[in-house]
Amino acid sequence: MHIMSWNIQATRGCDGRFDTRRIINEIKSRSIPDVICLQEVSRYFPEMGGNDQLQALQAAFPEHEAVWSAAISWRHTDTIRREFGNLTLVKQPLLEDFRLHSLPRPPAEGLWQMPRTVIETLIRTDQGILRILNTHLAFHNRSERWQQLNYLNQICEQASSRSHSPLAANTAGCYTPAPDSEVTLLCGDLNLTSEDDDYLRFVGQNNWQDCWLYLNPEHKKSNKPRTPTCGCFDHQQWPEGAHCRDYFFISPGFESHIKEMYINTQTDASDHQPLSLRIDV
């Protein structure tokens, strides 16, 4: 299974142009992923191109089902809402179920803040159900981001507990046990650098396996910089230069399913780079 994750910055490239077609062409430039997880998708915000990027992306991938999570949804006209959020596109008929989560949003104490969400999709595979979490975490407030990371851990802890819990008997209708899985793949822009103490704390709490590190074990020994996912071309927003803040993590014990990970460091269609993962499921 081929899964892509990309913060598309509302289709704003490093040349300052908003270009949805450029993003679509980049996604299609290699084999079209089975699951496409996008962050920072905009609808009708004039400062973000003014167009309906959700509609354009849905039209570009007609064989995929769209799961849209608007973190912001403001009335613009009687028939149009300005929205901003995450989008997961799943090739039919792989989408078994989905849920939308609002992430913690504590008082920001004067810091910039916007609502954040995570899309939870349950994907049908030959070996069972795979849970994919697609998210974009807080940037300006470390305390807020840590609460959001804890929330992601709680989703996985509860899923693991459910998988070992006896099911109720004689259920029907909405009480029929929903599809579930102990295997979780987390992806997105976590706004957390790989050198951050909170990165180590988060990974350690649930024993997450960083997919890139699993495939590049020599990195820990050599201490070489890992492949960057952000700041490769846009040094105005990212004066620190190229670095990593976008990830694929998988539940502990399922590392052997990871087969290949590719980070496209050549495109400047966004300030972030697209990540592609292939897993054997």
Image (cartoon, rainbow, N blue to C red):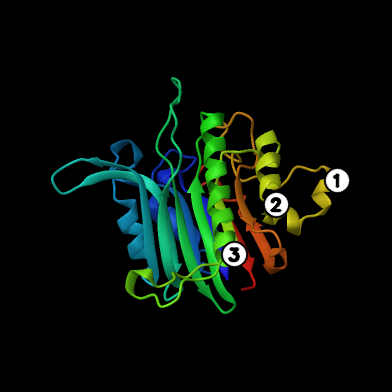
**Does 5 appear above or below 237?**
below
Q: Residue at x 42, y 67 (%)?
A: 97
Comes first in the chain, label 3 or label 2: 3
Pinpoint residue 105: horizontal percent, then vertical percent: 43, 35
- Place residue 176 in its image quadrant: bottom left
Q: Residue at x 33, y 54 (%)?
A: 54
Q: Are marks 1 and 3 in contact (CB under 8 Å)?
A: no
Count neighbours of disc 2 (C-alpha within 10 A) and say few if under 14, some if 14 to 19, many if 20 or more. Answer: some
Comes first in the chain, label 1 or label 3: 3
Marking on residue 222: 1
Regarding mark 1 in the picture, which secondary structure is present there?
A: helix
Count neighbours of disc 3 (C-alpha within 10 A) and say few if under 14, some if 14 to 19, many if 20 or more. Answer: some
Q: Is residue 152 left or right of residue 197?
A: left
Regarding mark 2 in the picture, which secondary structure is present there?
A: loop
Q: Nearer the viewer, residue 62 or 252?
A: 252
Q: Are marks 2 and 1 in contact (CB under 8 Å)?
A: no
The three-letter amino acid code for the residue at tag 2 is: Asn
Q: Which residue is mark 3?
A: 182
Marking on residue 133: none
Pinpoint residue 226: horizontal percent, then vertical percent: 72, 46
Q: Is residue 88 left or right of residue 2?
A: left
